[in-house]
Image: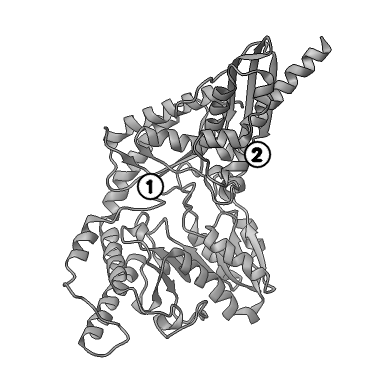
């Protein structure tokens, strides 16, 4: 267990948070965007091994991608890159792609306001 | 690579070396169905009788015939709850269980509700001790059987079983006590404790898997829950698992013999483990601080999750358990941890260490270091 891109970005360009502690999984994704590309990405996760692994994997997959490319990363892509997840973990712990998308949405909302 | 440290004896016990030696003494070609009357059958019968004596001896049962052998604690619990309730249904169709019983007690009890039985769960306090007043209110003259275990496998709390028995008997009920985790670790005496039915697991005594026993006080009527031949007084039909039963008997004998010394030794190791782990920031003991099984240490750590604790500890060479929902088949939080008043996210952060004969004081510093490192790592990742 050696997760990549752990931590926070101060004043992130986009921030996404999904899950809840009752289910045992709560993920946060922070992104820094430059010229439509995810330049830096960090995560924090409360959850099981699968939750931590999917968080780490989604940050690896998204780093350096354009926002459009990153929006296309699915839960299945994450699970496939990890060479599979236990079936019962596919739903509860495979939230990382959702957190990434939430962070990108948040970035786009902020752009609209500016 | 460093030697592994196994701290999940509540899940599976290694077979006691004395039991392995005993098993090795069985003659090659040993066979014999105890239901037959030729010599091989008589040897098998005698083998069962000896095992029954040994198991009866561990729990202070006066008659070896009060012991029936089963496939394990789950089956014993099912027969005790379901078989007793159904056989005595005309008394009133009420059953009681503590809120933190094992699911092999709670699930048959819940299933009986479909047949018109009323199940009342007696609550426990924050240490997991059954609330005796609430138990007194739950048990009525119509109650057939109340099931309260000697001790809990997730939090180690030992129940005041004699007071429980008094309450249940005062109201005319029967007491079933699951002793799966307690037997061989604390003294058990069905006469002194006032237990009417008692569950044992072969593996938890240091014997093989797939064998257990149920003590039924003479005179108590129980009906079978599976049907077949007349083995084990008709309560556990099917040809007896002679070899495993013999090994369970030997495990019971050894457990009784070694308990005073081994429990003292494990209690000391357990106490230093608890002292070390409680030094970690935001570590909390779960279960009772003193009235707990001698081999049992259980904790929760704020803001982190138990399955990831388990995985991280595994990578450091140490096997521990957790009550986290993420490791259960149903993905539901442990009913035990919720019953002692933990919130869902608190229950997620549980870690349980149950010691056995191969553990020693010398391992404690490495375990404490590993837990400290794991907690620190996961806290660096957590979003809570």
Residue beneath disc 1? B294
From the top left corner, tell me how far across and down residue B128 is, in percent: 55, 48
Report which quarter residue B170 is drawn in: bottom right
Within 10 Å of disc 1 (Cα), the crowding (few <14, some 14-19, many 20+) is many
From the top left corner, tell me how far across and down residue B232 is, in percent: 40, 80
| Quadrant holding the N terminus of chain B | top left
Q: The numbered mark 2 sits on a residue in which chain?
A: A
Check the image and report above or below for B228 versus B144: below
Please say whether residue A94 is visible from this viewpoint.
no
Report which quarter residue A108 is drawn in: top right
Please say whether residue B369 is visible from this viewpoint.
yes
- Picture residue at 28% right of the left edge, 71% below the top: B243
From the top left corner, tell me how far across and down residue B112 is, in percent: 63, 70
| Quadrant holding the C terminus of chain B | top right
Residue beneath disc 2? A22
> Which secondary structure, mark 1?
loop
State which mark lies toward you, 1 or 2.
2
């Amino acid at each position: 267990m050696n997760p990549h891109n752990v931590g926070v970005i101060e004043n992130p360009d986009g921030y996404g948070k999904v899950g809840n502690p009752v289910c045992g999984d709560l993920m946060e994704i922070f992104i820094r965007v430059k010229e439509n590309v995810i330049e830096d990405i960090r995560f924090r996760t409360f959850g099981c091994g699968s939750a931590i692994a999917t968080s780490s994997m989604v940050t690896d997959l998204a780093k350096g991608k354009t926002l459009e490319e990153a929006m296309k990363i699915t839960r299945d892509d994450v699970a496939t890159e990890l060479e599979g997840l236990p079936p019962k973990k596919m739903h509860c712990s495979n939230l990382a792609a959702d957190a990434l998308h939430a962070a990108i949405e948040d970035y786009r909302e902020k752009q609209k306001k500016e | 690579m460093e030697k592994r440290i196994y701290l999940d004896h509540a899940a599976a016990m290694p077979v006691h070396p004395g039991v392995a030696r005993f098993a090795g003494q069985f003659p090659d070609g040993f066979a014999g169905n105890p239901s037959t009357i030729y010599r091989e059958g008589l040897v098998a019968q005698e083998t069962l009788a000896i095992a029954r004596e040994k198991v009866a001896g561990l729990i202070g049962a006066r008659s070896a015939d009060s012991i029936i052998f089963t496939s394990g604690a789950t089956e014993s619990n099912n027969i005790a709850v379901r078989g007793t309730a159904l056989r005595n249904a005309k008394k009133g169709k009420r059953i009681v269980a503590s809120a933190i019983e094992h699911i092999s007690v709670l699930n048959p009890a819940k299933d009986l509700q479909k047949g018109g039985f009323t199940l009342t769960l007696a609550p426990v306090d924050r240490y997991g001790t059954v609330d005796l007043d609430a138990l007194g209110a739950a048990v009525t003259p119509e109650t057939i059987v109340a099931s309260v275990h000697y001790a809990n496998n997730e939090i180690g709390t030992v129940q005041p079983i004699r007071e429980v028995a008094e309450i249940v008997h005062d109201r005319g009920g029967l007491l079933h006590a699951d002793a799966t985790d307690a037997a061989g670790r604390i003294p058990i005496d069905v006469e002194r404790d006032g237990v009417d039915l008692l569950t044992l697991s072969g593996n938890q005594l240091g014997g093989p898997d797939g064998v257990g026993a149920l003590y039924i006080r003479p005179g108590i009527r129980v009906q079978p829950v599976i049907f077949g031949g007349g083995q084990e007084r008709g309560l556990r039909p099917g040809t007896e698992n002679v070899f495993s039963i013999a090994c369970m008997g030997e495990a019971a004998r050894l457990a009784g013999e070694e308990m005073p010394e081994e429990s003292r030794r494990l209690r000391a190791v357990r106490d230093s483990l608890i002292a070390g782990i409680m030094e970690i920031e935001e570590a909390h003991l779960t279960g009772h601080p003193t009235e707990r099984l001698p081999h049992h240490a259980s904790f929760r750590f704020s803001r982190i999750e138990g399955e990831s604790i388990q995985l991280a500890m595994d990578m450091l060479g140490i096997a521990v358990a957790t009550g986290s929902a993420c490791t259960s088949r149903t993905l539901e939080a442990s009913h035990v941890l919720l019953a002692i008043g933990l919130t869902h996210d608190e229950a997620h952060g549980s870690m349980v260490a149950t010691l056995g004969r191969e553990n020693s004081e010398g391992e404690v510093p490495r375990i404490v270091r590993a837990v400290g490192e794991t907690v620190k790592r996961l806290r660096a990742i957590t979003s809570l």
